[in-house]
Image: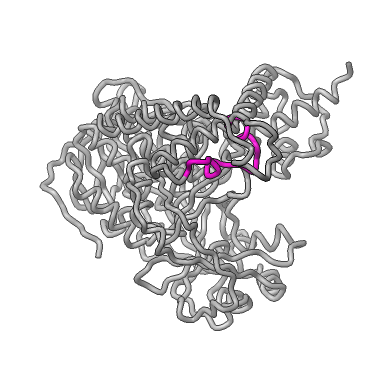
């Protein structure tokens, strides 16, 4: 049961946050924790922190963002640790630089956790209402926001306003060719706020979607491949103490589409809003609907569908990979064409939703808008997708709104220190034409922006602005010192040949060299069983740093090469399709936009640092010597 508590309310605040999804929660908590009198206005207070799509946190690059949020003093990592059903390390078979944490969470427990965090936060008032308009004073061609108009509470005044409206701005839901107004199923759309924003900001239209929800009791799990959680203690937040909850995890399962599924979808595209031009907004390239997958990848015989629980207390199942806006009867038939789902019952049908967004090149790195002073935007309104991307922006917007109230300099995260900084820089400097999703390939610094080291990179910011307490920071400083000491010790300590009988050692060898071998990790340290959990984590961090010493130097060389080549010209007739190694998306974007220089190519959304290096090498081969 979600606990809703309202506090005594005035009508004037330092900061007003519109919306209480993942972005709004972080913004409101950050602002109030920094001492600002803050209000969060939400249409339905029972949906604070609601996981409207997959109840999961993390994944490639996204898990790193959650660690960064935690290192800055945010809440998402703690909530994920407290409410997970399953915890896994993704990409475990690859190097530590691409390891990412992912939890499957109980969506009701997660929302209750966030609700409690907001309700019990001092300086924070929850107002259940709909914002209908912004109060903007257009004084001497320098518009600035003074607060908001609400449907029931009238005018609410503020020094700063943060808009985190998700998919609710003129939200339009699609199931087949049927349409209904709404930002999520059974929730109203915000119709008038868009008009207020569009007077000052350029806006566009995007689309996202969600799969049907299934009844667990009607699934034949004997036909599915079980996917268990990892049998070890894992955590997003540095402050989560060791516990043995990991010994009682829920399993996910794996099914897949069949040739019958594909025939059914291809035969009913005339009933799909995506393929009848009913939906106008661009959808996420990296999280496509099942219709898109089948059409774009006709050569594939099947696509994996992950069968994931939504709660420990209900029978709701989320079929990840099955986003769809096909009609209800087709949804039922395509589900029953898959192994284990032959007799499945649908609890809720999948749908697509179109919504308004603001082109993010109109933002500063602080997430304040250029054209309207004191107005901040965060989350899906900026053209992003994903809980983690939204929460990272919300935290930055909340911090900067509070710092501005206090006449302090804004927090600007750099590309080289965070994925959050990379994301915000991408949003501001690149043309966003489809929902932006954070991926490791988007960062030229990805080898140093790892899951194991957010507190090393960002906790100094969290402490300096006041979101990490002195005690928390002392704990982090202790971890940093211990990790650095491990690095020094491993360079001095030598391993006897008997410690590694399979490594063909003839003499004692420094651990710093042994740990560079890909098949050796921190658990192979000869005294590992004598260490506490925290000591093991510090050793692990030191080992990863040793493994990547050489790679990090190479990364710096590549970054410098890109910087030095920004003015390099690209011939007008250059054939981008002839470049081997470029992703299809990158080739399409380069061929369409025809950049004249490397700098222009860098500014194209979908063209990543790795692509730029390939392009530079291709140009060097193309240029006569």
Q: Quadrant of residue 497?
A: top right
Residue drawn at point x = 38 percent, y = 35 percent: 71
Q: Residue furthest bottom?
A: 343
Percent coordinates x, y for residue 192 in the rendering: 35, 49
Left or right? Give the position of 45 relative to 533. Answer: left
* Rendered-image quadrant of the C terminus: top right
Direction from residue 507 to residue 251 in the image, left or right: left
Q: In the image, is residue 270 part of the stretch drawn in magenta?
A: no
From this viewpoint, is residue 177 visible?
no
Q: Which percent across, then down, holds residue 551?
A: 64, 29
Question: Which residue occupies the foreground of this view, 62 or 475?
Answer: 475
Q: Nearer the viewer, residue 160 or 409?
A: 409
Image quarter of residue 596: top right
Q: Quadrant of the N terminus?
A: bottom left
Figure quadrant of residue 309:
bottom left
- State the residue lying farthest toward the right: 624
User: Could you tell me if residue 146 is visible in this image?
Assistant: yes
Would residue 191 appear left or right of 115 to someone viewing this image? right
The part of the chain drawn in magenta is 511-528
Question: Residue at the location (54% across, 35% down)?
Answer: 544
At which x and y percent is residue 35?
Answer: 20, 32
Q: Please check the rendered image and state whether residue 527 is part of the magenta-colored stretch, yes or no.
A: yes
> According to the image, what is the colour scheme of the structure?
one colour
Tell me the residue at 63%/42% (across/down): 500
Residue 26, percent from left and from top: 33, 42
């Amino acid at each position: 049961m979600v606990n809703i508590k309202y506090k005594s309310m005035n009508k004037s605040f330092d900061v007003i946050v519109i919306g209480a999804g993942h972005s709004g929660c972080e913004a409101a908590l950050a602002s109030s924790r920094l001492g600002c009198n803050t209000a969060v206005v939400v249409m339905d207070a029972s949906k604070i922190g609601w996981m409207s799509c997959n109840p999961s946190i993390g994944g490639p690059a996204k898990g790193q963002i959650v660690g960064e949020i935690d290192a800055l003093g945010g809440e998402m990592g703690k909530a994920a640790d407290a409410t997970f059903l399953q915890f896994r390390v993704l990409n475990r078979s690859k190097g530590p630089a691409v390891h990412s944490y992912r939890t499957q969470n109980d969506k009701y427990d997660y929302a209750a956790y966030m609700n409690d965090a907001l309700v019990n936060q001092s300086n924070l008032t929850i107002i259940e209402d709909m914002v209908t308009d912004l109060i903007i004073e257009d004084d001497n061609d320098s518009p600035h926001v003074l607060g908001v108009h609400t449907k029931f509470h009238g005018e609410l005044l503020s020094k700063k306003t943060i808009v985190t409206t998700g998919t609710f701005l003129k939200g339009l839901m699609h199931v087949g060719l049927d349409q209904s107004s709404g930002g999520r199923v059974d929730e109203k759309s915000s119709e008038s706020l868009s008009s207020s924003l569009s007077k000052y900001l350029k806006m566009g239209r995007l689309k996202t979607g969600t799969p049907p929800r299934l009844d667990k009791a009607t699934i034949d799990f004997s036909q599915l491949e079980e996917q268990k959680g990892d049998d070890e203690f894992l955590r997003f937040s540095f402050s989560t103490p060791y516990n043995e909850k990991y010994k009682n995890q829920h399993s996910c399962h794996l099914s897949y589409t069949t040739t019958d599924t594909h025939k059914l979808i291809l035969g009913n595209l005339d009933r799909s809003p995506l393929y009848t031009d009913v939906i106008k907004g661009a959808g996420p390239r990296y999280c496509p609907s099942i219709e898109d997958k089948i059409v774009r990848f006709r050569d594939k015989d099947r696509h994996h569908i992950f069968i994931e629980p939504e709660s420990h207390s209900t029978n709701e199942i989320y079929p990840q990979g099955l986003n769809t806006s096909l009609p209800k009867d087709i949804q039922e038939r395509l589900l029953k064409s898959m192994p284990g789902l032959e007799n499945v019952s649908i609890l809720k049908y999948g749908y697509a939703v179109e919504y308004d967004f603001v082109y993010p090149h109109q933002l500063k790195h602080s997430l304040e808008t250029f054209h309207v002073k004191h107005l901040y935007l965060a989350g899906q309104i900026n053209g992003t997708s994903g809980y983690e991307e939204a929460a990272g922006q919300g935290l930055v917007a909340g911090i900067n709104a509070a710092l501005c109230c206090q006449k302090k300099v804004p927090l600007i995260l750099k590309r080289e220190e965070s994925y959050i900084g990379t994301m915000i820089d991408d949003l501001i400097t690149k043309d966003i034409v489809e929902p932006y999703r954070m991926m490791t390939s988007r960062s030229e610094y990805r080898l140093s922006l790892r899951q194991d080291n957010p507190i090393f990179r960002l906790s100094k910011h969290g402490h300096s602005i006041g979101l990490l307490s002195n005690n928390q920071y002392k704990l982090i400083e202790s971890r940093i010192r211990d990790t650095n000491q491990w690095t020094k010790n491993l360079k001095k300590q030598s391993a006897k040949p008997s410690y590694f009988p399979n490594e063909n050692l003839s003499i004692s060898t420094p651990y710093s060299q042994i740990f560079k071998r890909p098949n050796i990790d921190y658990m192979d340290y000869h005294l590992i069983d004598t260490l506490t959990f925290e000591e093991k984590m510090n050793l692990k961090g030191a080992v990863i740093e040793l493994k990547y010493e050489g790679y990090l130097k190479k990364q710096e060389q590549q970054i410098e090469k890109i910087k030095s080549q920004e003015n390099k010209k690209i011939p007008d007739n250059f054939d981008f399709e002839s470049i081997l190694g470029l992703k299809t998306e990158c080739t399409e974007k380069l061929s369409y936009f025809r950049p004249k220089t490397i700098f222009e190519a860098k500014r194209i959304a979908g063209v990543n640092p790795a692509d730029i290096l390939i392009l530079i090498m291709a140009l060097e081969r193309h240029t006569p010597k």
